[in-house]
Amino acid sequence: MGEGRLSKRDFIKLSLAGAGCFALENTLSAKALSSLSPDEEKLWKWSKEAIYYIQTPRGIKCKLCPQNCDIELDKVGECKTRLNHNGKLYTIVYGNPCAIHIDPIEKKPLYHFLPQSLAYSIATAGCNLACLNCQNWTISQKSPYETRNYDLMPEKVVEEAKKYKSKSIAYTYSEPIIFYEYVYDTAKIARLQGIKNVFISAGYIHEQPLREIARYLDAANIDLKSLSNETYEMLNAGTLEPVLNTLKILKEEGVWLEITNLVVPSWTDDLDEIKKMCDWLYDNDFNNVPLHFSRFHPEYKLTNLPPTPAETLMNAHEIAREAGLNYVYIGNLPGSKGQDTICPGCKKVVVSRSGYVMKDFQIKSGKCEHCNSTIHGVWE
Ligand code: SF4
């Protein structure tokens, strides 16, 4: 597809029309509509023709993710960020992140990738899933009309990352798949300038766009929410298979991979199900891919549930280790022993962490300093 942009006048008109559609379809309040940014220049900049779509008799079919949205004229897809204008699909979040932070890479979490480095982290509004438990729902479940956005084109992102001495740019917080074109252009520039690109995602994407973006990615943390398709459908509004494919493809493409599993009480805390997931990971050659069990905090539509009990996380950790996974961690549980890296050879602690701070590091040239076993990762 081309690089077409809307005219400034058309875009503003359609942005408002698109938001109008939301008001009907997604019960966007009149108050939110009245708070649309008056900055016309910014609105104009925030559109770019999408890369993956086809025209159909029904309008447009977006080919970026397995939601496969059919999008009628002047409407947006499920992710709230892709607009059909005159039979072409436009991303309306290009260059307008609503969140920018400089984080330690451990916060992503990526424990085996350039430890203690900084990641210049950006997100736009929107998401292609609708997880009931979403921890970032104040941006992920909103349209870009409802968030306060910055004006930061790809060149500027890379410039800022360098200014703040970040070794990587992290596309994170909401869902980088839905700001794909923005990630793609930024990642290409970053690669040329020696900055790494890390993708923190639920992995719900089609193969072709994934392989294309993977060429510019250095590391990824992918959520594996469960090994049950039913859970994916009911908790996340997605399906399991595409996520499993994403894990395999990223590994094939040589992107450093880590996996996060959020343990949600009564949804994904069944220990037999956790064992099934760990067995699948082992059987499919993910035994050297770090697995992070993350503690749930009551958020979004699941505020009635308690935080995950520490004991459940410790049990999950033990199950994963027994299943043969070499690097297993517990996240969001301060003081837990589940933050340290254990050498698969001699079983000694080779990296000890407290929160996002590394306290001790006994790896040299990717090997355990005690027994010389390989500790998988990108350490320097
Ligand atoms: S990226 Fe958005 S518009 Fe495209 S298929 Fe997925 S949810 Fe639908």
Image (cartoon, grey):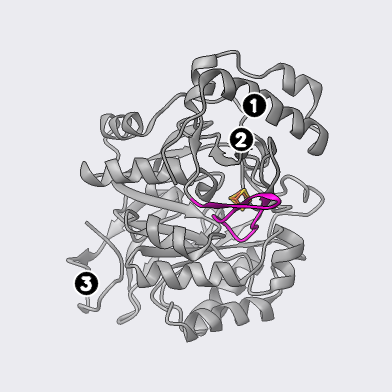
Tell me if I can see residue 241 in this picture: yes
Q: Look at mark 3 in the image and give the residue it sits on.
A: 367
Q: Earlier in the sequence, mark 1 or mark 3?
A: 1
Marks 2 & 3, CB-CB < 8 Å contact? no
Residue 60 place in picture, x, y as percent: 63, 49
Which region is colored magenta? 52-70
Q: Look at mark 1 in the image and give the residue it sits on.
A: 14
Indicate left or right for 290 with 6 as reference.
left
Q: Is mark 3 within 8 Å of ligand 1?
A: no
The amino acid type found where label 3 is placed reads: Lys
* Identity of the residue drawn at 59% across and 37% down: 125
Residue 352 place in picture, x, y as percent: 36, 60
The magenta stretch spans residue 56? yes
Q: Earlier in the sequence, mark 2 or mark 3?
A: 2
* Identity of the residue drawn at 50% across and 52% down: 52
The one of 231 and 188 positioned closer to us in this rendering: 188
Q: Nearer the viewer, mark 1 or mark 3?
A: 1
Residue 226, compared with residue 353, is above or below; it is: below
